[in-house]
Amino acid sequence: MCDNRLDSNGVESIAAAVSNLTAVVSIKWGHDLGDAVWTALSFLLPRTTTLTVSARGEVVAVSGTKGINSMTLSCGSPLGPCGALRLAGLLLEVQPQLLVMLNLSANKLGPGGGTAIGEALTALTSLTSLSLGCNELGTAGATALAESLSLLTELHSLDLWDNNIGATGAASICCAARGLGCICLGVPLDVARAALLSGGSSLSRVNMPKVDCEDRIGGVEWGKERGVGKDGDWLEVRALLLAGGASIAMQEHGLRGLRKLYDAPYYHKTDSKALLAAATAAGCTHVVVAAARSGAEGGVLKVAAAGALEAALGGTAGGETRLSHGVHWYCSRERGFGFAPNDDITLDPSNPRDSNHPTDPLRLSWRVDGKHGGYRAGDERDLFCSTKYRKVIWGFRL
């Protein structure tokens, strides 16, 4: 419907008609609907399964049932606190029972907007995935949000990356969402570790890897002998997932019992497709990728990061990266494989490696699917023939 001159009454009429369609359709409005966006959305929400609002104000409502497949409404700017209040009011009014995924990342909600969305969560009883990253929620917003999380019994995934929620906010979220399988809060690793320990055994399921005890890896029953970090139960892995970002000097024994998908010298020629196939066949949803020290210094990971399997090994095109648990991942034959704390990565097809920020300790880069081996482990580069480090990947399910 590009280049139209619909007013609010026209938008309401079309939205009402579309909401009654039984065929699958896709509609894109070609201009800013202004205030009429809320009217249109009110008709769509009862059948919406996935709702996303981008930082550009683009609202996408997707239905998994017969009817609307997708509908894009242009608002032109992030929601902000005022938009969050209006959306929260609409969610409470409509109470969309089919909504399973809500993504409001990078919408400048602020503490007030976060509180409003938190109150609206009480109406979203079917929600399984909630993304509120980069919204300046602060401790107040996170604490308010935590009050509703315990009511979302179907929620599995929560992303609050880059919200400056602090130790108090992190502890509140962990205590409220103790049954969640996958949480990323974007806090320092020590804060994440403390948050996981703050509730004792009541937090035993937060980011807990799921394993199959019927598999035996190198004589160790997978899942039987858990990482021995402080208090066991893969605390370091869970904290890494919760914190988001990469880690240095992590102890390798903290990952004991997870499925080791790959362990080879840094000079080894890595086959990325074979790794993805092996991880998929094993039922893994997440991986830990690391440069591990060899020889006398063995047992210490120079640099490590955890993320979703699809983001880490699923493949990327051009110079794009995929963000998962606060880490930017890339994987392609032309541009190499690795991760970095941001998307400032120059990947030249003629020289596929990340050489940016040479002193950055939180970067890893390997050449893959070619004649060369690894390249970078933190602030050390040119490791094509190195025996100092090993390439290691562990897999697990969340």
Image: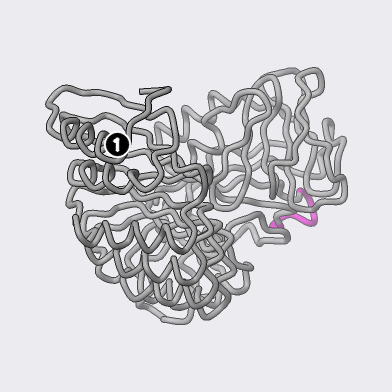
- Residue 192 is at least partly visible in this image: yes
Query: Is residue 236 on the magenta stretch?
Result: no
Magenta extent: 294-300
Q: Residue at x 42, y 81 (%)?
A: 199
Disc 1: which residue: 62
Q: Nearer the viewer, residue 37 or 107?
A: 37
- The amino acid sitting under disc 1 is Val
Q: Specify whether residue 287 is in view.
A: no
> Could you tell whether 161 is left or right of 132 in the image?
right
- Where is the N terminus found, in terms of image quarters? top left
Between 232 and 80, the one lying in front of the other is: 80
The crowd level at tag 1 (other Cα within 10 Å; few <14, some 14-19, many 20+) is many
- Where does residue 319 sit, x and y in percent of width and height? 68, 28
Q: Residue 301, image x and y in percent?
A: 70, 54
Q: Is residue 39 above or below residue 69?
A: below
Q: Residue at x 80, y 55 (%)?
A: 296
Percent x, y for residue 290?
66, 47
Q: Is residue 297 in the magenta section? A: yes
What residue sits 27% from the left and 48% below the top?
Answer: 100
Q: Quadrant of residue 83?
A: bottom left
